[in-house]
Image (cartoon, rainbow, N blue to C red):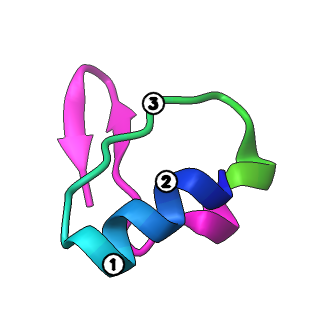
Amino acid sequence: MNFFRELVQKERKTVILVTHNRRLLGYCDRVYRLERGRLVG
């Protein structure tokens, strides 16, 4: 995960992470969820 964080901070890149693991949410700047087939932010 540190690789992705550095990529975002140093290279100004966007990373989209799709996971069911809530422990990874701490690495994210924004979190979106799917609820009943709709993207919720």
Q: Position of residue 32 (x, y in %)?
A: 34, 52
Q: Is residue 31 left or right of residue 16?
A: right
- Mark on residue 29? none
Q: Tell me the residue that label 1 is attached to.
A: 10
Judged from the image, the secondary structure of the residue bearing numbered disc 2 is helix
Q: Tell me the residue that label 2 is attached to.
A: 4
Quarter in which the C terminus is drawn: bottom left
Location of residue 21 (image quadrant): top right
Tag 2 and tag 1, C-beta contact below 8 Å? no
Tag 2 and tag 3, C-beta contact below 8 Å? no
Q: Tell me the residue that label 3 is attached to.
A: 18
Q: Residues within 10 Å of mark 3 (few under 14, many from 20)?
A: few
Q: Is residue 38 left or right of residue 24?
A: left
Answer with mark 3 or mark 1, whichever residue precedes in sequence.
1
Amino acid type shown at disc 1: Lys
Taking the spot 36% from the left edge, 79% from the top edge, the residue there is: 9
Q: Is residue 7 left or right of residue 22?
A: left
Judged from the image, the secondary structure of the residue bearing numbered disc 1 is helix
Image height check: is 24 above or below 16? Answer: below
